[in-house]
Amino acid sequence: MDKYTFDDYLKEPRSLSFDRMTELHRQLMAEIGDDPDAGELYEALLEEATKYAEIRASWPLMSREDRMAEDPSRTAHHNSVISHYDMLARFLGRQGKAAGWREELGDEKADRYFRKTMGDFACFLVFINSLMAR
């Protein structure tokens, strides 16, 4: 198994620095605020992001055969994470919020690497949520 550092990640296309992910998360949390509907949408995003992150974290440990078997599920959860980003951003936009965090995560149609960025940020959300589960 290969061993990686955060510096290795930062060399990847469309990667986000830890500080940038932290700032995007702050923006997102500020926009959600105490709005119960936005909170529910965020919770649904976290549920899907957790499922996606679990598969992604296991990926380097899987055999080629296991990856092939798991790939449809990983893709489905990734697609769902992106849909949940979009739902939350649309809702916040209707509330007059900028949702600039969503724009910064990018559009996979414009650049395929933005899909990876969106997955990275989902893992960051799970990371923060996991730390707070202590």
Image (cartoon, rainbow, N blue to C red):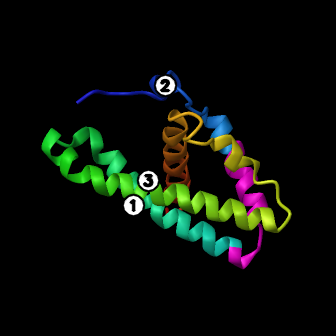
In the rendered view, would you say 93 is above or below 20? below
In the rendered view, would you say 21 is above or below 26? above
Read off the residue under disc 3. 78
Residues rendered magenta in the picture: 23-37
Q: Amino acid at mark 3?
A: His
Read off the residue under disc 1. 51
In the rendered view, would you say 2 is above or below 117? above
Read off the residue under disc 2. 12
Bin the neighbour count of mark 2 within 10 Å (Cα to Cα): few under 14, some 14-19, many 20 and up.
Answer: few
> Residue 37 or 90: which is nearer the viewer?
90
Q: Amino acid at mark 2?
A: Glu
Bin the neighbour count of mark 1 within 10 Å (Cα to Cα): few under 14, some 14-19, many 20 and up.
Answer: some
The secondary structure type at the circle numbered 2 is loop
- Provide the major secondary structure of the magenta segment: helix
Sequence-wise, which precedes: disc 1 or disc 2? 2
The secondary structure type at the circle numbered 3 is helix
Cα gap from disc 1 to disc 2, whole angstroms: 23 Å
Q: Amino acid at mark 1?
A: Lys
